[in-house]
């Protein structure tokens, strides 16, 4: 007699194991399955900070968390409903954030005395036997032994057979939540196409896990999460780094420009370089430089030559690029600098997330060097943010800093692929001939004669007859571009460059405010990757009967023109940030509004519960 399938509206699963256990692969495949099924999903890959920590130790634990639901979700969830722990270290590292009553699936074969000691448990005292897991629904499964048994007919060394246990776990979870399996089978066959025996073994392990769920009675009849309603369109699961790469390609195409990426690998930005290097058929050129300075120097040179120059980095690399960004400010050429932020000063926390580069992006250069700064707010939004960064850079002839972070870069969500006509047309409007006359009436080219609307100077491609001009880091004379040490001219050029950035605000759309009923007296204002947690927290506050408004900033310099008016509408303004209050400080300096700061720098995204508590506390004091 078949057991009843339980319907639930949402589930959070956390896969955890050693960094070599394939947890990211399992998470990616479960995400793809859930997206194909029609669920809304949000993910959070949690990589270990060490490249290869000793196996079975806490520093080496790698995890992947996914929330999938029959409704819109904006975070990977505060806590898991299901923890899949491949060894004692994975259990110990993740048990503290697990709510009582959660399902815990463990590989009992890994709970040996040696592994228990490496994970910090007393020798011979297993949490599976000492009663410490009494508050959870523990499913002790011999994943390793079952996998090896399922692959006995394959001529594989035992170690290779054991590696298939991640596919066994994926098959088990796929059965538990009635995920479609065809795409995963096709993926495995394609991934191991050059080694058919490995492809067959992985498919067999995956199938064995499915069959184990079907035949055992430990999991009842499993669970079903219905598909979520969506706006019509074509969807795919996408990470922030991949979306950003695609956005750069699309924007370059809309501008009719070849795309050149000059970059140096750095976590967590490297995947943008990897992705763009595979897209040569779209007119993309990638240059992996020997260091950060060479990368941006090449990108700026490409812009001078008439291409769309882009460079990618994280916070430490942004510091190294600062002088060349200042050169781009002086040259007034398009350049996109992508900063995928990570935690901490110096090398900090390479695999963890933070929003602490805002002030560096705004002011981290010598002299008055104004640069437009904008930030993406979700993995899918990285596409639109990249397009917007290119639009501003090309239209206003300026370097632009685009901020992402590790949470967005590695996280994923369903993304509706836009139609081409939904994207803006970006016009480089290259200079083609003289734009002025000299003292004796002869036509000439003045490289710093500006567009009256944008204050952008002409973009003249080297080699264009009659448009010869000088570039360099020394101050330029207004209009002519000659080297100038004149005090009045320097003052004029500094103010003009600032005014050019400020003019960007004229073309920005009004801020979107989420304020159902219009009766809220508290505004939660965010930027970057706090968008998802803030949205979820505001939804929970409203569901409990509270009133709260929400707005999110993409443009951080210049601020939208209506920001001051918006802030003035509310009695209290709360700004959550994964730093020590950088945006809040800027707002206090700029606007006569009492801005309250909520900060954390734990290398992790905000929890929805902590944001909800903070919002309700502020609202109670109004």
Image (cartoon, rainbow, N blue to C red):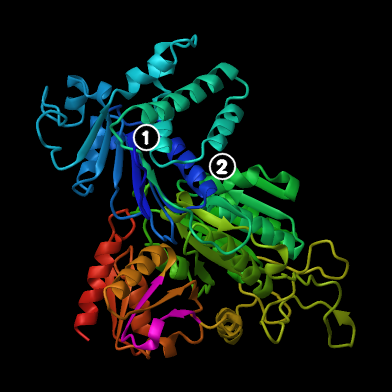
* Label 2 crowd bin: few (<14), some (14–19), many (20+), radius 10 Å: few
Image: 370 above or below 622: above
Q: What secondary structure is marked by label 1?
A: loop
Disc 2: which residue: 290
Q: Mark on residue 2?
A: 1
The foreground one among 548 and 298 is: 548
**Residue 183 in the image: x percent, y percent?**
56, 37
Question: Which circle, 1 or 2, is nearer the viewer?
Answer: 1
Residues at marks 1 and 2 touching, judged by CB atoms closer than 8 Å: no
Q: What stretch is highlighted in magenta?
A: 511-526
**Residue 264 in the image: x percent, y percent?**
54, 46
Image: 492 above or below 14: below
Distance from disc 1 to disc 2, alpha carbons, whole Å, reads 61 Å
- In this image, 476 relative to 529: left or right? right
Tell me which residue sits at (57%, 54%) in the image: 243
**Residue 408 in the image: x percent, y percent?**
45, 55
> Can residue 249 be seen from the camera position used here?
yes
Tell me which residue sits at (65%, 46%) in the image: 286
Q: Using the rendered view, name the quadrant where residue 575 is placed.
A: bottom left
């Amino acid at each position: 007699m078949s057991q009843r399938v339980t319907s639930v509206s949402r589930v959070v699963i956390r896969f955890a194991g050693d960094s070599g256990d394939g947890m990211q692969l399992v998470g990616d495949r479960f995400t793809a399955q859930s997206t194909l099924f029609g669920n809304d999903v949000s993910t959070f890959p949690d990589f270990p900070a060490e490249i290869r920590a000793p196996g079975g130790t806490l520093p080496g634990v790698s995890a992947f968390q996914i929330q999938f639901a029959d409704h819109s979700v904006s975070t990977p969830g505060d806590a898991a409903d299901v923890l899949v722990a491949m060894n004692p270290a994975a259990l110990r590292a993740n048990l503290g954030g697990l709510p009582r009553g959660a399902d815990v699936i463990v590989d009992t074969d890994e709970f040996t005395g040696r592994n228990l000691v490496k994970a910090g448990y007393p020798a011979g005292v297993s949490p599976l036997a000492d009663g410490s897991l009494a508050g959870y629904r523990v499913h002790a499964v011999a994943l390793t032994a079952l996998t090896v048994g399922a692959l006995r007919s394959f001529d594989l060394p035992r170690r290779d057979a054991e590696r298939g246990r991640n596919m066994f776990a994926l098959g088990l979870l796929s059965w538990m939540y009635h995920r479609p399996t065809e795409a995963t089978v096709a993926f495995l066959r394609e991934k191991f196409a050059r080694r058919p025996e490995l492809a067959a073994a992985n498919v067999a392990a995956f199938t064995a896990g499915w069959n184990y769920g079907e035949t055992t009675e430990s999991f009842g009849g499993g669970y079903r999460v219905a598909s979520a309603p969506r706006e019509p369109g074509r969807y795919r699961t996408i990470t922030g780094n991949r979306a950003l790469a695609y956005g750069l390609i699309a924007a370059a195409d809309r501008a009719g420009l070849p795309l050149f990426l000059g970059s140096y690998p750095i976590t967590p930005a490297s995947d943008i370089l990897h992705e763009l290097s595979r897209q040569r058929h779209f007119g993309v050129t990638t240059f992996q430089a020997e260091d950060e300075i060479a990368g941006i120097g090449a990108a700026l040179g490409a812009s001078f030559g008439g291409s769309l120059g882009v460079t990618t980095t994280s916070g430490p690399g942004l510091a190294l690029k600062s002088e060349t960004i200042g050169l781009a400010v002086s040259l007034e050429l398009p350049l996109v600098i992508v900063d995928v932020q990570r935690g901490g000063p110096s090398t900090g926390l390479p695999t963890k997330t933070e929003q602490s580069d805002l002030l560096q992006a705004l002011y981290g250069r010598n002299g008055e060097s104004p640069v437009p700064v904008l930030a993406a707010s979700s993995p899918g939004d990285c596409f639109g943010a990249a397009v917007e960064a290119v639009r501003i850079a090309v239209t206003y002839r300026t370097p632009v800093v685009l901020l992402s972070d590790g949470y967005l870069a590695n996280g994923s969500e369903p993304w509706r692929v836009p139609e081409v006509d939904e994207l803006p047309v970006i016009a480089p409007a290259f200079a083609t001939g003289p734009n002025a006359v000299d003292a004796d009436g002869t036509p000439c080219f003045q490289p710093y004669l500006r567009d009256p609307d944008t204050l952008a100077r002409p973009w003249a491609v080297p080699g264009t007859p009659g448009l010869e001009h000088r570039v360099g880091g020394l101050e330029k004379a207004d209009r002519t571009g000659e080297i100038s040490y004149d005090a009045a001219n320097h003052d004029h050029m500094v103010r003009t460059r600032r005014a050019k950035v400020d003019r960007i605000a004229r073309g920005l759309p009004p801020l979107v405010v989420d304020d159902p009923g219009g009766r809220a007296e508290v505004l939660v204002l965010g930027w970057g990757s706090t968008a998802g947690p803030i949205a979820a927290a505001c939804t929970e506050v409203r569901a409990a009967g509270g009133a709260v408004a929400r707005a999110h900033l993409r443009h951080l310099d210049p601020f939208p023109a209506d920001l001051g008016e918006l802030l003035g509408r509310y009695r209290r303004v709360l700004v959550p940030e994964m730093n020590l209050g950088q945006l809040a400080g800027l707002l206090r300096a700029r606007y006569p509004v009492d801005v309250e700061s909520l900060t954390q720098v734990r290398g992790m995204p905000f929890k929805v519960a902590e944001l909800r508590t903070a919002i309700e506390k502020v609202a109670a004091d109004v």
